[in-house]
Image: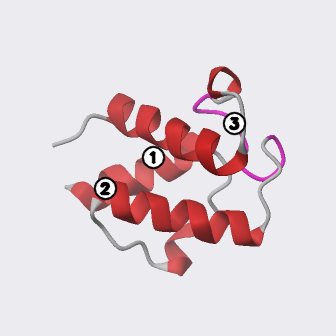
Amino acid sequence: MMQIDNIIETLKKILADQLSADLDIITEDTDIINDLGADSLDIAEILMGVEQDFGLVIADDALENVKTVGELAAIIERQLK
């Protein structure tokens, strides 16, 4: 099973690639929309990357209140169990 730290590192890479962001500025507390400037299309593409990299399907309603990298990582970790 993947550890939360590994999940966060993988997420950081997906976000940096998708949003052309500096990997070093992305932390567990980074707000994906407000800090990284993601729009709805970016979010959809990030989710596709997450689903592909982690081999899971995340329901849209599971993400309604997700704002930060850490919150998204926690959802992924729960689904991987």
Q: CA distance from mark 1 to mark 2?
A: 11 Å
Tag on residue 13?
Answer: none
**Residue 56 in magenta stretch:** no
Q: Nearer the viewer, residue 51 or 18?
A: 18
- In the picture of the structure, the residue carrying the numbered disc 3 is 30
Quick one: label 3, few (<14), some, or many (20+) residues within 10 Å? some
The disc at residue 73 is 1
Which mark, residue 54? Answer: 2
Q: Is residue 35 visible?
A: yes
Give the image location of residue 6, x and y in percent.
Answer: 34, 32
Q: Amino acid at mark 2?
A: Phe
For the stretch drawn in magenta, the main secondary structure is loop
> What is the magenta range?
27-35
Q: Position of residue 38 (x, y in %)?
A: 77, 56
Question: Is residue 7 found left or right of 70 in the rendered image?
Answer: left
Question: Which amino acid lies under the numbered mark 3 shown in the image of this protein?
Answer: Thr
Place residue 58 in its image quadrant. Answer: bottom left
Residue shown at 70% from the left, 63% from the top: 42
Residue 29 among those drawn in magenta: yes
Question: Cα distance, mark 3 to mark 2?
Answer: 20 Å
Q: Residue 57 or 79: which is nearer the viewer?
A: 57
- Bin the neighbour count of mark 2 within 10 Å (Cα to Cα): few under 14, some 14-19, many 20 and up: some
**Left or right: 18, with 10 as reference point:** right
Q: Label 1 amino acid?
A: Ala
Rounded to the nearest angstrom, the CA distance separating label 3 from label 1 is 12 Å
Residue in the image at 63% along x and 51% along y: 18
Q: Secondary structure at mark 2?
A: helix
> Which one is earlier in the sequence, the residue at label 3 or at label 1?
3
